[in-house]
Image (cartoon, grey):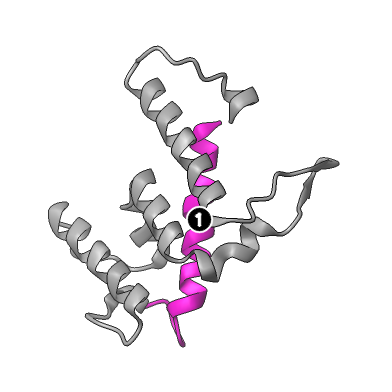
């Protein structure tokens, strides 16, 4: 379940960031710099992670977002919340259930923190008091 959440967040952010920063083709991540401070911060993050992992040819936004950890995704979401808020602050229904609305940046980031905490405990075989379905 947590894996599904992380993949959904990763692909959602990839699509939305691509919409924000691409012009004619999917190449925003190939820029060295931009006039937009948020984009520059993201470009720097991509560069740092790609250099650490010795990645040279990133060909699409999806490949770029594959290099990010859940913590990286959370920072990107936090940095771009004003552009992405509509995704989380508007009501949505799934299987006849109204999904929780995260109307503030703080509430969304807090929920992702809880998910990251549970994920880290589970993946590192530590005992957890979190009941995934109920609490997450």
Q: Is residue 53 magenta?
A: no
| Element on which disc 1 rests | helix
Pinpoint residue 47: horizontal percent, then vertical percent: 20, 65
Pinpoint residue 104: horizontal percent, then vertical percent: 58, 56
For the point 38% across and 67% down, the residue is 60
Above or below 42: residue 110: above
Count of numbered tags: 1
Above or below 59: residue 52: above
Residues in magenta, as a range: 1-27
Above or below 90: residue 18: below
For the point 27% across and 80% down, the residue is 31
Side of 133 where 18 appears, left or right: left
For the point 45% across and 86% down, the residue is 23
Side of 18 where 32 appears, left or right: left
Q: Quadrant of residue 29?
A: bottom left
Query: Which residue is label 1 attached to?
Result: 11
Q: Quadrant of residue 56?
A: bottom left
Badge 1: how crowded within 10 Å, few (<14), some, or many (20+)?
A: some
Above or below 52: residue 56: below
Q: Quadrant of residue 48?
A: bottom left
Q: Is residue 4 magenta?
A: yes
Pinpoint residue 85: horizontal percent, then vertical percent: 59, 63
The secondary structure that dominates the magenta segment is helix
For the point 45% across and 66% down, the residue is 80
């Amino acid at each position: 379940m947590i894996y599904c959440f992380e993949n959904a967040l990763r692909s959602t952010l990839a699509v939305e960031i691509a919409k924000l920063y691409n012009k004619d083709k999917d190449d925003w991540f190939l820029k060295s710099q931009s006039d937009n401070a948020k984009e520059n911060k993201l470009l720097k993050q991509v560069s740092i992670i790609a250099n650490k992992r010795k990645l040279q040819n990133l060909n699409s936004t999806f490949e770029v977002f594959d290099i990010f950890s859940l913590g990286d995704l959370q920072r990107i979401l936090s940095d771009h919340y004003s552009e992405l808020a509509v995704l989380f602050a508007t009501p949505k229904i799934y299987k006849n259930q109204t999904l929780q609305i995260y109307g503030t940046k703080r509430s969304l980031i807090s929920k992702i923190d809880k998910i990251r905490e549970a994920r880290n405990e589970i993946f590192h075989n530590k005992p957890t008091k979190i009941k995934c379905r109920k609490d997450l």
